[in-house]
Image (cartoon, rainbow, N blue to C red):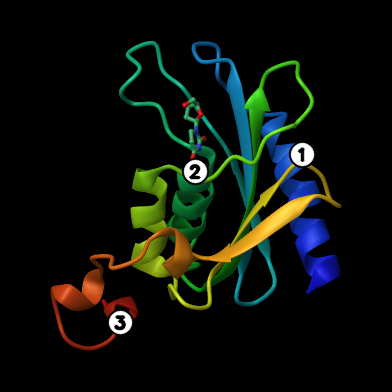
Amino acid sequence: MQTEIQALIRRAIEARKLSYSPYSQYQVGAALLAGDGQIITGCNIENAAYGPSNCAERTAIFKAVSEGIRDFKAIAIVGSPAGEEITQYAYPCGVCRQVMREFCEPESFQVIVAKSEKEYRVAALAELFPESFGPENLRDGNPKAF
Ligand code: THU
């Protein structure tokens, strides 16, 4: 898992370089590990109207889902102001946690926040987003079948 995590962080650091964030100048990169081992990346994408801005995590998840991938194991996230070293852990915002909750198993899905390949923290989605509302609240059975 250690090597897998480091590879994921590396991809998130690369993805952060593509961040389009002229308004906040806060750059975020994410790398999502799918069940079959593929990695889907995302960056934050801002907008002059502010509201339509999208976080890096949601960019990665929406990219994956739109390509038919819905089974996820982990996500690595790196974020910090443009032009600065990554000196902080960028935890996912509440909206991104809810979007993760839609597709990921809360107890097993791993959220990795990193400063570098060597300095990172890992938490299960359930720890970051306890007592959550999800697809099972609305309907019986497996929501992935829909
Ligand atoms: N941002 C993310 O990409 N992920 C998060 O979880 C927190 C915030 C982005 C949104 C916006 O483009 C910038 O960081 C500042 O909020």
For the point 28% across and 68% down, the residue is: 131
Callout 1 touching callout 2 (CB < 8 Å): no
Picture coordinates of residue 27 (x, y %)? 62, 26
Of the numbered discs 1 and 2, the one sitting upstream in the chain is 1
Mark 2 vs ligand 1: CB below 8 Å: yes
How many neighbours does mark 1 have within 10 angstroms: few (below 14), some (14-19), or many (20 or more)?
Answer: some
Q: Which residue is mark 3?
A: 145
For the point 37% across and 64% down, the residue is: 101
Of the numbered discs 2 and 3, the one sitting upstream in the chain is 2
- Indicate which disc residue 146 carries: none
The kind of residue tagged 2 is: Thr
State left or right for residue 54 relative to residue 14.
left
Callout 2 touching callout 3 (CB < 8 Å): no
Mark 3 vs ligand 1: CB below 8 Å: no
State left or right for residue 9 relative to residue 67.
right
- Indicate which disc residue 59 carries: 2
Picture coordinates of residue 74 (x, y %)? 60, 65
State left or right for residue 97 relative to residue 20.
left
Q: Secondary structure at mark 2?
A: helix
Q: Total of numbered circles in the picture?
A: 3
CA–CA distance in space, label 1 to label 2:
15 Å
Q: Secondary structure at mark 1?
A: helix
- Indicate which disc residue 14 carries: 1
The kind of residue tagged 1 is: Glu
Q: Which mark lies nearer to you, 2 or 3?
A: 2
The residue lying furthest to the bottom in this view is 141
State left or right for residue 54 relative to residue 114.
left
Q: Quadrant of residue 122?
A: bottom right
Closest to the observer: 103 or 84? 84
Of the numbered discs 3 and 1, the one sitting upstream in the chain is 1
